[in-house]
Image (tube, helix red, strand yellow):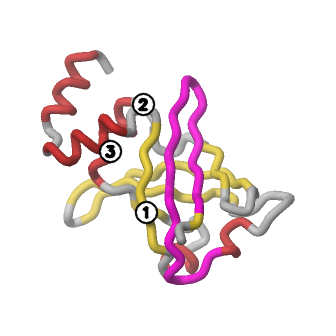
Amino acid sequence: MDIEEIKKQLLRLSRPQLEAFLQNLDHVSFSFTINMSFLKYGNHPITIPKEFYPFLSVHRITENHDLRLLFPDGSTATAYIYRGKAGYGEYFQIKIRQSFSQRGVGVNQFRVGDRIRVEIFKSGDKEQIQLSKML
């Protein structure tokens, strides 16, 4: 993507969306409340808020590309960004391919109603997702 395309993408944002984007240039973070869909489905989907779609585009974090996911207890998993379309338009979700590692409990540490902070990092060639519990 060239600079002109990036400018066009930025012009489409509302002022609050643009401010959120610029403040999080190397990463984005948002809160998520653990729900039944997250716990029930094997891929444990987390929907990414629309204001962060330009971040994914600008940093070329493409769908179906494996990302390292770090859980609050230090366990890791392999995740990917999924792009879908529903009646209300395009959406992006984080989905987990493999939800646990050799150490730690992965997804099993969460309960319905837990609030977590989701951070998507892009630093150089490294991309990572980190989940942390909120108090």
Considering the numbered disc 1 on the image, is that residue within a helix, a strand or a loop? strand
- Residue for badge 2: 59
Q: Secondary structure at mark 2?
A: loop
At label 1, the amino acid type is Ser
Measured from the top left, where is residue 1 in percent x and y? 32, 21
> Residue flagged by tag 3: what amino acid is it?
Tyr
Label 3 sits on residue: 53
Q: Which residue is mark 1?
A: 31
Residue 90 coordinates in the image, percent (x, y):
27, 54
When the figure is inspected, residue 57 is found, relative to residue 112, above or below; the finding is above
Estimate the spatial distance between the alpha carbons at disc 3 and disc 1, rounded to whole Å.
Answer: 16 Å
| Residue 33 located left or right of residue 91 | right
Q: Are there few (<14), some (14-19), or many (20+) residues within 10 Å of tag 2? A: some
Return the disc, 2 or 1, that comes first in the chain's sequence: 1
- Counting residues from the start of the chain, the first of labels 3 and 1 encountered is 1
Magenta region, main secondary structure: strand
Most extreme residue toward the front is: 135
Which residue is at 52% across, 40% downward? 121
Q: Residues within 10 Å of mark 1 (few under 14, many from 20)?
A: some
Between the residue at mark 2 and the residue at mark 3, the CA separation in whole angstroms equals 10 Å
> Which amino acid is tagged 2?
His
Q: Is residue 25 located in the magenta-colored stretch of the structure?
A: no
Q: Nearer the viewer, mark 3 or mark 1?
A: 1
